[in-house]
Amino acid sequence: MRTHSISVVATALVTGALARPATIVRATPAGAAGTIGGKVTYTGTPPKMKPIDMAKEPNCVTQHAAAPVLTENVVTGPGNTLRWVVVYISAGDQGSAPGTETVRLDQKGCQYIPHVLVVQPNQPLDIYNDDPHSHNIHPLAKVNPEWNKSQPAGAPPIHTKWEQPEFIPVKCNVHPWMHGWHMVLTTSHYAVTGEDGAFTLSGLPPGKYTVTAWQEQFGTQSQDLTISGTETKTINLVFKATPY
Amino acid sequence: MGKLFAVVVTIITLVATAIFVAHVWWLPADIAVHGPAIDHQLRETMVSAGLLFVVSQLALALFAWQYGDRKDGRPIKLFPGGAMPMVVSAIVLVGAEILALTFVGSKVWAGIFQSPPDPNSLVIDVQAEQFAFYFRYAGPDGSFAATHPELINEASENYFGLDPAHDVDARDDIVVPSLAIPVNRPILLRMHAKDVNHSFYVPELRIQQDFVPGLVIPLHFTATQAGKYEIVCTQLCGLGHYNMRAYLEVMPQEQFDHWLKDKAAQQ
Amino acid sequence: MDHAATPAAVHHHAPPQGFLRKHVFSLDHKVIGKQYLDLALVAVCIGMALSWLMRVHLAWPNLPIPGLAKLSPNGAANGVITPEYYLSLMTMHATIMVFFVLTSAPFAGFGNYFLPIQVGAEDMAFPRFNMMSFWTTCVAFLVLISSFFVSDGPALSGWTAYAPLSAVGKDAGPGQGLGQTLWALSIAIFCVGQLFGSLNFIATTLDLRTKGMSLARMPYSTWAWFITSVIGLIAFAVLLPACILLLLDRVAGTSFFIPAGLVISDRLQPHSGGSPLLWQHLFWFFGHPEVYIAILPGFGIVSTILPVFARKPLLGPRTLVGCMTAIAFLSYTVWGHHMFLSGMNPFSALLFSVPTLIITIPATIATLLWIGTIYGAKLRFTTPALFCLGFVSVFVSGGLSGFFLAQPSIDTYLHATYFVVAHFHFVMAVAAMFGIFAGTYFWFPKMFGRMMNETLGKWHFWLTFIGVYCIFMPMHYLGLAGNVRRYSAFTDDYLKPLIPLHRFITIAALLTGAAQLIFLYNLIRSRFRGPRAPDNPWQATTLEWSTTSPPPFDNFGGHPPVVSHGPNEYGVPGAAGDYVMQAASEPARVR
């Protein structure tokens, strides 16, 4: 039986921009205990995180009056770490289980929370509008069917799922600055980094694996490694950052 | 029944006219240099149309009241002069009004749309897209960098498709979602659309202009009063059309300079 | 000018046999006319229901509408209309009303039924073409309605379908996939039906007039239908290729209307070289004459009916026909007044503004002629008469707002506001509708052999007349305040204070809509239970009143009438019953 860390997932998703959620961890099959951990960092100069002016939607300006929202395409942390990097087993995957619990996406304060979410094929995804005005979520899928749907204030959540593996950029048709990603991964061994850039992939049976880190601006970095027993291997994935 | 018709038409005419005259709902105060001319044209038209409205509705009402069939065997009366007075009065009165309005109105129109912009205008690049307006100021180098549609990336707020990696010119352009302008300074907007038709409308400025994909359309005006006004889209552009707006902030020159520096630092 | 009916021009039919031939694929212009009217009736009910949904949403945007979630789970998930669904409702409302009501009823409906009879013919010149034109229109309607059931929703770019929004395909958003393609297809098919119809009307008017029916003696409704069909021939001949070009841009990768470098849905569009303004020119070159196609039959109907109930000849009949002709001619020179701010050269705004203002002159003359007709009259305030008088009042109201919009300097402020919505609803939704109502109450006895109920008719008139002023007069005020049109909700700061006025309009609209049930009830009940109508219940002069109610299948029972009088012989001193019918055997009066 798998143990679930739903509470961790839920907390991470709902907390919002100011929080620094722990890395999101998937369940581990009993008896397979190899772990790959590490940090995602960058070298060079990343682009500035710019404050987003949501002037056309005063509701959202008020919601963020205390602290302005910054662009999320490159989010850095102390020690040159990178947030919102998806780290996952891209080759040699074993011991993955399909995702069954519902993943939640919130549209709140004219932002997608979380900025990057991961689902597995056919995993239920619920999309909520928590704002007092309309949003129109538009996943720009190329492999999966592309769709968009308006949710006026108070509309019921959209219940949906993605069937094919794909990295799907998501925009709001009504608020041009609202962007996010839906990462559809077949593996259940994945993590999304927080501000500390750290990730942990656990429950890996012995074998050869390729670990890939994906960052929406800088692309991917991969490393191959072998797990032979119950050890923890630590790797660092480093992106070359450019200001533009 | 005829009398009822006459009464109803009279009441409707008087109530409708009263609401117009009393300006219960009316134009907002104008803040543009060319505003008074437009308001004057509107007032003139409102007076002549209003007179025609009242006179024709009341004539209709009067005749409906007077000329019911009272079954008293009286003969019908033909309108004195037949159709000729109608033709003549329409041509003369309406014709004269048309001439006057066209003569004056064409000068007003030409003043806004056919005159060259002031050479000292502050030039601002405006992009309309589904569903927001973005404004670009030239920055200290005074020139607008080239734009590349294929480089547009909203997630990183590169709405215009600038290429700062290879184009030094692009690094100082200032892109913002609000149109801030100094008061009493001629402004020249260069308007272009990213995707479909849009339009730029500020009721207080009394000005409107469509954005047409494929064209860069100039629009110039001077605002005479500081304040915060709404710019709204008036050309149906899709589902977000109702919510497509930006704020126009008119402010004293020094405040504007400060604002511009502020925004430049945030780019 | 006399025109003798030649043997070749006279059609002889055998009476139709069989259910399909009699009632479905009929060649009889009277059946076809009724079919058009039935189609328009279904269309107006749908169009009006759509407008109720729109108005309720505007007044109470967060109110769930009971039952709507079942009808449209995508468009109104919990009964609340989404922004895109609102625009689809608006697009379908306008398209259905303009094409399938305002072009179909007064022109194709009444025109088909009464033009041949009024000129003394047995049928239209091309009965088969006539039948095809109806069924083509019907197919167009079904194609349009089918777009409601498309997964992406019906088109949402307005009945004006401006490119590139309407041309790039589904990248442009919901409603712009199959829904928009079906829209363009439907309108293209509609054009074909109209072209058939126009040809028929023109040929019939020119060639099939009975002995003695010179052009000068034609009833004014016939003149109006004739002039309208000429306008339609040219206008629809432009809309048809425009729709085809739009379809090619959508499905065949052409770029008539799409320039290069457009980024929609984060994708660089593959088109280049097209012009969005081209679509606007083509559309409005059709679109402006189209509104005169909608109103001129109303001119004709009112000019025919008013004298009947005034018991007095129409003032200045030749002037009236001259006005209609001038309007028709000028209607081709003004299309750019829809485009003053479109980005076309500002100088052309002045060029278009002048004929637009000039067109007010014949419209004013016509209005004055009607008012002059009731001067000194002996008015009988029957329901058709009331609707004619109401027509004059609302046409004045609607026409005068055009005076503002015709001037580019004022249009700069009023363009795309509710002032425009007020203007075109007054002249089309109200005035043209009043023409249709007047025609219905007037001609119902002739078409069905039964009288409609006068009391119900008067209630219908009063509630509608007051109702439409309550709905559309306030829209002028909204426009003056700068209230932009085609908004699915009023979230802008300056619009929020106007919402109470919108609520007033919505309530007026719902009540006025409910009042139309009186008309519907009257229509259906009278059809089966109305008192039998005599041949000429109104004591009117035109040829349809010389035959039975309803007319026999060949209109005149094998005896084509011989015309010796014009249609305007009312209040004739010394005539039996104060009028002389067109087919009366008295000698022709010199006028």
Image (cartoon, rainbow, N blue to C red):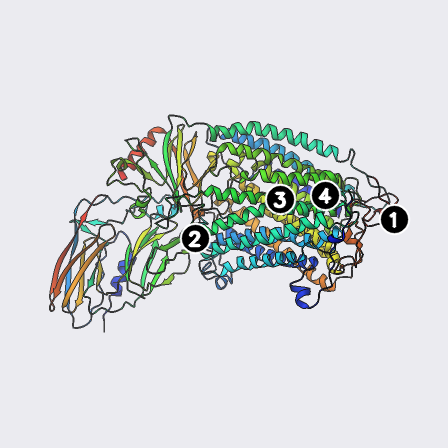
Image depth: mark 3 or mark 4 in front: 3
Where, by quadrant of the figure, is residue C530 drawn?
bottom right
Where, by quadrant of the figure, is residue B101 drawn?
top right
Which numbered circle lies on residue C292?
Answer: 3
Circle 1 — which element?
A: helix
Q: Nearer the viewer, residue B223 or C116?
A: C116
Which numbered circle lies on residue B6?
Answer: 4
Circle 2 — which element?
A: loop
Q: Earlier in the sequence, mark 1 or mark 2?
A: 2
Q: CA distance from mark 2 to mark 3?
A: 34 Å
Image depth: mark 2 or mark 3 in front: 2
Q: Earlier in the sequence, mark 2 or mark 3?
A: 2
Q: Which chain letter matches label 4?
A: B
Which residue is pictured at 38% across the width and 61% down the height?
Answer: A158
Vertical side of B18 occupied by A172: above or below: below
Q: Disc 1, disc 2: CB below 8 Å?
A: no
Vertical side of C468 occupied by B206: above or below: above
Please identify the quadrant where the N terminus of chain C is shown.
top right
Residues behind callouts 2 and 3 on a single chain:
yes
> x and y percent of residue C447 in the render?
73, 58
Q: Earlier in the sequence, mark 1 or mark 3?
A: 3
Q: CA distance from mark 1 to mark 2?
A: 68 Å
Q: CA distance from mark 2 to mark 4?
A: 59 Å
Q: Which chain letter matches label 1?
A: C
